[in-house]
Image (tube, helix red, strand yellow):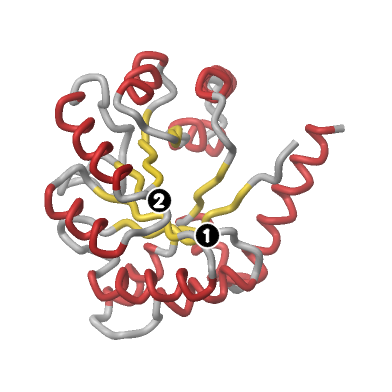
Amino acid sequence: MSRLRLGVNIDHVATIRNARGESYPDPARAAEVALAAGADGITAHLREDRRHISDGDIDALAVLTRKRGRPLNFEMAVTEEMERIALKHLPHAACLVPERREEVTTEGGLDVAGQHNRVAPVVATLKAAKIRVSLFIEADPRQIAASAEVGAQVIELHAGAYCNAVRERNPDADHLLRRLRAGAAQAAALAELNIGHFLIGEAVFTGLDPAIRRMRALMDAARDEAAA
C-alpha cells in the first residue's frame, strides 16, 4: 500500500498576517517549516477577493516549492483570471474549487455535473500546460462521474460535513463516512490529505513543526494498520 501523502494548506497563516495588515507571519516561512516537518507538498488558495493568500505569496511559494523540489497545489476558482495565474506559475497541481464571496471558507463541492461546459475547457487548458488537475467535489456518484468526463486526473472529496458530525457527536457521522468511502472506492484515486485550518489551529498550542509531525505520524500509523 502506497504512502499516504500530506499536503499542508498555509492559507490561514496569511489570515493571521492580514488581520493586522503586517508582513508577519510569512506564509512562505510556514511552508518551509511544513516541508521540513514531513509535509509532501504545499497547498494555497488564491481567492478572488485575496482575503488571505496574496499574489505575492503565490510568487514566493512557486519559487520555494520549485527550489525544494516539492509540489505546489494551487487552489483556484474556475475563472479566466485564475487560469492566467496558474499558467504563469505552472504549479505541479491545480485544484478547482467553488467560491462564493460571502462564505467564510469553501463550503461544499464544485458542481461539475451542472457546470460541465464551464469546467471542461479550464481542465483541458491546465492539462495541456502539464498541470495536474483535481476537482474539489462532494462524494456524489454523479459528480465523480462528471469529473471523469471533463478529464480531471484527481478528485478531492469534501469531508467538512463528516468532520463537523464527528465533532458534534452527530449520529449522521457513520453515514457520511460510508459515503466518503464509497466515493473514494468509485474514484480509485491516489490518496492525499490536504489539511490547513486544523494544523494552524494546533500550531497555536504546540508549534507548527510538532503539529505537522504528529499528523504525519498518525497518517503513517493508520496506513500501516490498514495494510496489516
Q: Is residue 222 left or right of residue 69?
A: right
Pick the quarter of the image with the C terminus: top right
In x, y percent, where is residue 116?
20, 24
- Using the image, determine if residue 204 lies above or below residue 186: below
Q: Is residue 61 left or right of residue 5?
A: left
- Using the image, determine if residue 183 lies above or below residue 13: above
Considering only order in the chain, which callout, 1 or 2, is on the residue closer to the N terminus?
Answer: 1
Residue under numbered circle 1: 41
Residue at position x 15%, y 46% from top? 79
Q: Which mark is residue 83?
A: none
- Using the image, determine if residue 25 lies above or below residue 8: below
In x, y percent, where is residue 81?
13, 54
Q: How much space separates mark 2 and mark 1, taking CA atoms? A: 10 Å
Q: Residue furthest top?
A: 142
Residue under numbered circle 2: 93
Label 1, residues with CA under 10 Å away: few <14, some 14-19, many ≥20? many
Identity of the amino acid at label 1?
Answer: Gly
Q: Quadrant of residue 10?
A: bottom left
Q: Residue furthest bottom?
A: 23
Q: Residue furthest right?
A: 228
Disc 2 on helix, strand or loop?
Answer: strand
In x, y percent, where is residue 109?
33, 32
Identity of the amino acid at label 2?
Answer: Ala
In x, y percent, where is residue 175?
54, 17
Residue at position x 52%, y 18% from top? 186
Residue at position x 45%, y 32% from top? 157
**Mark 1 and mark 2 in contact (Cβ < 8 Å)?**
yes
Question: Which label sits in the foreground, 2 or 1?
Answer: 2
- Using the image, determine if residue 79 lies above or below residue 67: above
In this rendered view, identify the residue nearer to me: 200 or 132.
132
Residue at position x 47%, y 61% from top? 42
Disc 1 on helix, strand or loop?
Answer: strand
